[in-house]
Structure formats: structure tokens, C-alpha cells
Amino acid sequence: MQLPALRPGDAGDRPAVTVGGRTWTYREFAELIDQRRLLAFDQPLLCATGSVVEALTTVFAAAAMNQPVLVTDPASPIPMLDVIPPGTFLVVVTSGTSGHPKPVLRTAASWVSSFAPLAELSGIGTTDRVLLTGPLHATLHLFAAVHTLTLGAELTDRADQATAVHAVPAVFAELLRTLPADAPLRLAVLAGSALPDELADRAATRSVSVIEYYGAAELSFVAARRHPQPLKPFPGAEVELRDGVLWVRSPFLSLGYPHGTIGPFRRDESGFGTVGDLAAWGPDGGLLIRGRGDAAITTGGATVLAEDVEAALAVLPGVAAAAVVGLPHPRLGQLVTAVVEPIPGADLLGLRAAAREVLRDQSLPRRWLITDRLPRTPGGKVQRHAVAQAAARLTAGDQPADDQPTDDHRASRQSAGGVIEPGAQPGEAWAADLPVLRPLP
């Protein structure tokens, strides 16, 4: 099967991109791509930085010129890339929740081959206005923007006018809280962390259909579903579970990392790849994603998966988001510690009791902290490593007794993040600073 070219939809004078109060038509967008091609004809590696429009025109210009393009955080140092393997189109730099930047290489075909299956699954079409909810150096948002433009739909930063959105669940939850009741939003494509049923139910009350997919920068699409159906392998993906670790073979896999880069992605001789995520088959035949194996907490001889506890806490009354980390403990090995971001104005006095109703034994957090805002990656995922570092600083020089928080010894800067306000430029304020933590009353 011959894949279509990676280029914007031919939509003439229809809106292509609306950001910062200005709209570019597809005709104007195509002219900008041509201009970028002229400026980059002798560049072996294009860099997609600057504004949303500048970065996207660079990506499409690179595709038209069959040249590689680097998409990275403009505030971060450009990674050293001594050798780029033949066939590489895209170089993205991802840190996920680990905080260790890793360049990931992929071909144009690994992207383009997923465009049609996602469009069919989601129902996004040329008449949609798709909301951009994060910076383009996060792969979720970069793919969403490029996919939108190849369909001939409109990419927008106007939340009040969007009919569809790509986002992580935490950002989508905030969007639902702030959108007016008459907003035209009809569809949400969510990824990056597990979708709480409560959030999907809340979306249904607003007549917003929810598509959830699981993947990784190295793997791209692995599994997807339309809520409330079970999570099944994405069309074209073969999934195997080996000792609880998820492996996938598909045309969407990346090439991996540049030489000398160490990361979780592995590939076997048969073409299956993994990033070490744990999974199981549920009774309904769907996939249950348990999270990254390196997020496991060993406490009292038992293994607790941080993602499982976070998912249980996220649906409790008053909780906007939660991060769960393991802190060193002389008797238990690690102490399961919950850091909660409350819904503004929420009363969390009954949170411990509510947690005991849904969590048992070692999975029940023994230490509770709160913060006004959990730090997030550019893609909107909670940065668990930053939370763990802040919690460790809080307890530096003082080992707490079980379920007895100490005073806040150290405080550091509060990170930014969340939904793009109408008219704001994506990528202006995604910080990776440590959160300010304090004991839960």
C-alpha cells in the first residue's frame, strides 16, 4: 500500500491555524512552507522552533524536502546528534516522567501510516476545529497538530470554539471545568495517563465523546478505545504480553535512539518493541495498562504500582490529580507517599478515610502531602521524579513515623502548566521546577 505524502490538506482559503488571535488559511500556510523550503535548501537538519506556525511549517517543509527535522524545547540545549540514520525524518526529544531527555528517531512512514486509522477511530474531519493544549515539542501535541492539518481541519488555541481536542486527562478535566455550557466541543482524544471513568462520565454529560489511546514516543500507537469499550490493539498493531511486559509490533514503531543514547526502548529480532510498560488482559478482553515497571514501589516486601494508586486517588472527592512516590524507610524499604493536588476550594479532611475504602494493605499511602499544583511535563503528564525529589527534600534529615508527616523543611518554586488560555502561545510556561509541598491536615 502506497502511503500518502506528509503534507497539509488542500483546503484553499479555509482556516488552517488560528493562534494568538490570528488565522492563517491553508493557502497562506502553504506559502509559508514554500518560503521555509527556500531558506532551508542547504541545511542537513532543520530545527522546528519559534511560534506554532513557524514550527509546523518547518516540519512540513522538511517532509517536502525529504530532510530530517528536530523538534525540541526551545528553552533546552539542542542535543548532540553525530549520526542520523538514513530514513530518519523526525527527531523529537522526550523526557516523560523520568526527567532524562532522550532523542527519539522516526521515519515519516511511521507517522503517516497511523493517520487514517486514527481519523476513522476518532471521527475528526475537515469541518472540525481541533484545540492545541500543549507545546509542539511534546510528541502528543506535535502529532495532533500535524494530523489535524493533514486532514484539512483547523488547528486552534480557542478553547471556546473547538469541536475536538487532543489532551492528557488532567488537562481535559480542567477544560471541562472551565468551558461554558454552550461550547461546541464534541470529541476528546486522550492519552498520556489512564482515563478515570469519572472523567469519561463527566464528559458524557456534556455530550463529549471520548477516545482513549495508549502509546509512547518510541512506540506511537499501541492500543485504543472509544469509551466505554475496552482498550484493544490499535489497528495494525500486534500486542504480546511477556511475563507481564507489553511488547508491540507495528508500522508505527520508531527507529529508536541515536547512537550512545540510553533509554527504555528495546526491539527484538522479530520486530517487536517495548518500553517496559506492564500490562494484563482484562476479563472483557481489553488491555489493562499497569504503567512503567520502573515506577514500582517496594514496601514491606510487596510491590505497589504507582499508577494504580494514582488512578484510585484521582477519582476521590476533592482530588484534581495525584502523584505517588516511594520514600526510603528503614523498616518497610519504601514508604508509599501520596502527593495530592486538590480541586480549588476542596475540603480534604476526609481524604484518608475515602482512600481506605478503595485501597488496601500496602497500596494505601502511609504519608500524605498536598501541593497547589503538581509539576507536569510539556505533554501534561505529572513529573513523578520532581515530586519524589521535593518529597525527599521535605524529609531530609528526618525519617517520619508511619502516616506522621513532618514539617515542611524546604520549599521550592511552583511549576506552571495546564490548559492554554484563549489567545495564549503554547509553550510559554511549562516549567519543570519542584513543587511546594506541605502536610495534609
Image (cartoon, rainbow, N blue to C red):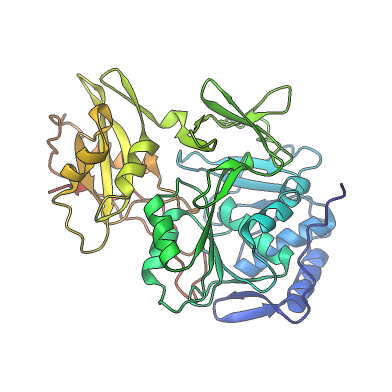
376 over 301 or under it: above or below: below
Looking at the image, the residue that sits furthest to the right is 2
Q: Is 150 located above or below residue 245 in the figure?
A: below
Q: Which residue lies furthest to the front in this view?
A: 284
Examine the image and state in which quarter residue 387 appears: top left
Q: Residue at position x 79%, y 50% from top?
A: 44
**Residue toward you, 38 or 65:** 65
Q: Is residue 77 left or right of residue 415?
A: right
Find residue 48 and report its horizontal and vertical position in percent. 66, 58
Return the x and y of residue 436 as percentages of the image width and height: 25, 51
Give coordinates of residue 171: x percent, y percent: 43, 59
Residue 330, given in percent of the width and then of the height, sits at 20, 20
Q: Is there any visible trace of residue 63 in the rendered image?
A: yes
Q: In the displayed structure, would residue 419 be above or below residue 384?
A: below
- Closer to the camera in the image, 374 or 433: 374
Image height of 377 relative to 127, above or below: above
Q: Which residue is drawn at 70% across and 71% down?
A: 126
Count of labels in the image: 0
364, 439: nearer the viewer = 364
On screen, residue 168 versus residue 411, left or right, reads right
User: Residue at horizontal 72%, vertical 59%?
Assistant: 59
Asked if residue 267 lies left or right of residue 88, the reply is left
Q: Can residue 417 be seen in this view?
A: no
Residue at point 49%, 36% (across, down): 288
